[in-house]
Image (tube, rainbow, N blue to C red):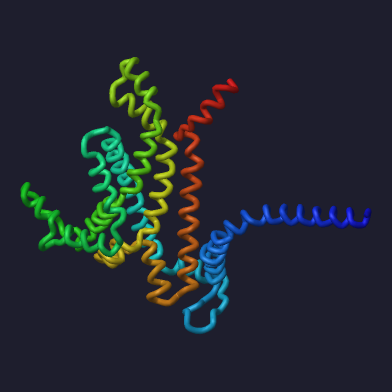
Amino acid sequence: MDISLDIKKTKRKKISIFKIKRDTLVPYLFIMPWILGFLFFTLGPLLFSLVISFFDWPIIGNPTFIGLANYKEMFFEDPQFWKSLGITAKFAGIFVPLNISVALILALLLNNNVKGSGIFKTLFYMPSVISGVALAMIWGWVYSDEYGILNYFLSTIGIKGPNWLGDPNWATFAMVFASVWGQGTMMLIFLAGLKNIPKELYEAADIDGANVISKFMYITLPMLSPTILFNVITSIIGAFQQLSLALLLTGGGPVGSTYFYAMFVYDNAFKYFKMGYSAANAWFMFLIILSLTLLVFKSSSMWVFYESEATTKKKKG
């Protein structure tokens, strides 16, 4: 009788242990596809690129370890590296504030409940779903020096438009305007942020006699600052990774004026087959983006307002 009871207890214990193990294991099985994807398609290639940045590897043939020679060539022997970096920095300096300003203005306009706002939301967001090839073709027609619609409209008001894609002085600006056209996603993020601002704040401001500018400066901007932070970071990353539009629209020209850093990395890898050197270029770009992101995060304590933190401080105070 005792032996039978012991056997039953042992079985129950085993079943209990199995259930605990199963309950622990099941969540990991659900996230396993993401983990495998991250390991094989993100972390693995990232670490592999770091390793090959110390090799001379022309894809065909065996890689040769050369230490920091790729980095030395990049910083001290390749003038195109600094030129492409400068072009990208100039593009980012114009693109990031302009993109955020345009997206914010559109979101503010759409935040008013006017008739037909849904149609405008669709129209403004539509460029975001157009592929890079189609986008390049559209802007190629718009900027055309011979039959471009932009220069046609300028001619109707007596202005002779420049050769947007053929003049080195205007090509970067043409790239910025074309890139800003696809800000639909950012506009929707801003719009979602605006919808979350409590109406009571504006009603209280109305009672106090605040005008539109005061409400924007002291209510809208502070309450929207976490959203602005997110959009600034994503804009910086997008600016430094600009490739497809420049590759298809200008090919890096004219006279290398739109030869962005991402194109410099791409050409070294797939045009000149210098995989090790290209990996070193890519890692430097990664460090630049990481540094800028950390800098923005560090400065966010001075200009980003979090309502939850303010409430906590108020309770403690």
User: Left of 1 or right of it: where is 180?
Assistant: left
Q: Nearer the viewer, residue 91 or 60?
A: 60
- Find residue 194 and report its image quarter: top left
**Quadrant (top left/top right/bottom left/bottom right) for the N terminus:** bottom right
For residue 94, say whether it is visible.
Answer: no
Q: Nearer the viewer, residue 35 or 263?
A: 35
Q: Nearer the viewer, residue 125 or 8?
A: 8
Q: Position of residue 6 (x, y in %)?
A: 89, 55
Q: Position of residue 315 (x, y in %)?
A: 57, 22
With respect to residue 64, does 220 lie above or below? above
Q: Position of residue 155 (x, y in %)?
A: 7, 52
The residue lying at 34 percent from left, 48 percent from top is 185
Q: Nearer the viewer, residue 210 or 273?
A: 210
Name the residue furthest right.
2
The residue lying at 48 percent from left, 39 percent from top is 299
Q: Position of residue 180 (x, y in %)?
A: 29, 50
With respect to residue 173, does 46 lie above or below? below
Count every numbered label the image shows and give the total. Answer: 0
The residue lying at 18 percent from left, 58 percent from top is 143
Name the residue furthest front.
1
With respect to residue 308, does 67 lie above or below? below
Name the residue furthest bottom.
61
The residue lying at 84 percent from left, 55 percent from top is 8
